[in-house]
Amino acid sequence: MINSSAGVTMAAGCSPWVWWSVLVVTVASAQEDHQQGFLGHLFARLSDLPVIGNFLRADVHPIYRPLVRQFHPRIGNKESELIDLCFDELGCINTHDDFLHPIHRPLNLPPNRREEINVLLTVHSREDKEGTVVEAVNVSQVLNTSFSPWRKTKIIIHGFLETNTETWMWDMVRALLVYGDFNVVTVDWSGGSQALYSQATANTRVVGLEVAHFINWLKDNLDLDPGEVHIIGHSLGSHTAGYAGERVSGLGRITGLDPAEPFFQYMPPSVRLDPSDALFVDVIHTDADSILNLGAGFGLRQPVGHLDFYPNDGRSQPGCDSLRRVPLTALTDGASLYEGLDAAQKELVACNHFRAPKLFTDSILSQCPYLAFQCRSYSRYLNGECVRCGEDGRHCARMGFHADTWPGGNVSSVSSFYVSTSAGPRYCIYHYRLMLDIAESSSMMSALRGNLRVAFFAEDGSVRDFDLTPEAPKTFSHGRRYTFFVHHYDDLSASSEALIQWTYKTDIFNPMSYCLVFCDTVFPLVRLTFTSVDSIVDDRLRDSEVTGEPREVLMCHQQGLEVVRIASEATVKVVSSPHCLATVTSHERNATHLLRHHNRTTGLLDAGLASLSSLFNMNLV
């Protein structure tokens, strides 16, 4: 594996005569001692080359050294040479054993020279939206820009193979300047990013030093408050932000947008982004299918911040499985066709990976809250089991730009935060929890099987429909509560009426579901509890004493009857009214009485036959 990567590394930047020299050196390394002086001089010359030189001077994990010894001749005391690497006024970096791992990081390359990476900083503001370039080697040039130390500062860092002309960066700059009067600084390190990935990861450490030096210079010379600085990094840029945060005391915030996995996942905190790099670190994971698990993901799964968000489980993002999205991106992203085409090619190659910066940018100006909930698993989140913020409000948070409103501050999260998003271009959606309480029944049928649909009335009178059984008919047992977690583009939090449609379906593997004589296919609904999950955010902003529980709207029979009887293939309206509270109390009392006299034998038989049916997993209508 290492031999192969070595070949690729040298092939990428070396002319044929260099290749021939390396081959001669490799073969001649086994010759007599009288040749060692010439070879040592040749190796020393080769080590100064931009690509081969870094490879020859790289540290390799001990487990692989016997395999690559012929490609890694020792030039002087290579081990001590790699301990500290210094870069003028930027300071030094240490290349200790933390940066080596037999699986996650077998190769530890030294970074390129500062002049090769050539970091450029472009300062944008409302007065200078196009921006003015500042050379990192001469940060005093910032005095000739519109930068103001009294504004909050946003610093954006791109990732692997990119430049600061990326469409997602321009979109983010524009949205930030619309939202607030910020200094927005984009970091161009294309001199170091447009290399082989292993080399680019090493170069991020120098870029981190450059960004830290820029912030510290502003602090020392212009009284900039580091606590008002927010670094936003994508992919390798996320870890670059972490390296900068290590060198800036009191840095306010770092946002990692799908931090890169290769060479970083499960490495020590000194190697990757971690919560100690800033006062607040929030991370959005969108491409977390591990490459090591034969997945196609570029982002890491490991939580690395105070808040780690996993939209759609942090894996396959909606719309990324279809090529039809690519031309749409070309038309909707950016401010010109050129920018749209640039975004479209990213969408084609790494849609999931580039979804993170899109979600962050959309969250800046969106009225939709992007509310995420802490949950032990994504499946439990989808079941609506985690839609509470808790008494202290720490169990939910807004993903994206407004994540710093989280009341947990800089307390590390103990589990993941999940949120659902759409395929775009409107990525944020509103989430609703529906709870249906089914009445007890004295008939022989202890369960009903069928399809259920619910529609809510929006404020403008339009109807928004939800299919609660989209994959197959569902079995509903009498006397039980069923929870559904649904979402929609529109805010339906003001809804107080709903239409419920029920269609009974026979299960051929369960004779008890046949409706001949002694049966009743009516769906006996006691109440529908409608919860607008995202309204928690608005409540908390309006009332500091809100406990973080979502508002629940109870809907029941229009005339106040205890049970809404919905015949098969019929649609019935339920409404919110004071009668619903009385219905709850009465039903719970009657349900307890009926439960004591329920025919247990019939119930067990029905459950057994239903289980037999589920084994066949038949979707019959």
Image (tube, rainbow, N blue to C red):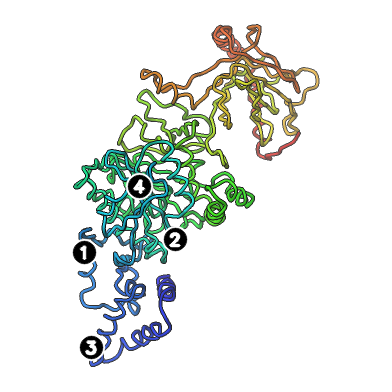
Relative to 612, 155 lies left or right = left
Sequence order check: which comes first, mark 1 or mark 2?
1
The residue where tag 3 is placed is 37
Q: Quadrant of residue 570?
A: top right
- Tag 3 secondary structure: helix
Q: Which mark is residue 155?
A: 4
Label 4, residues with CA under 10 Å away: few <14, some 14-19, many ≥20: many
* Viewport quadrant of the C terminus: top right
Q: Residue at x 70, y 28 (%)?
A: 450
Q: Quadrant of residue 446?
A: top right
- Tag 2 secondary structure: loop
The picture places residue 194, in percent across and down from the top left corner, at 42, 64
Rendered view: 307 above or below 566: below
**Are dots 1 and 2 in contact, CB under 8 Å?**
no
Rendered view: 295 above or below 81: above
Closer mark to the observer between disc 4 and disc 1: 4
The residue where tag 2 is placed is 161
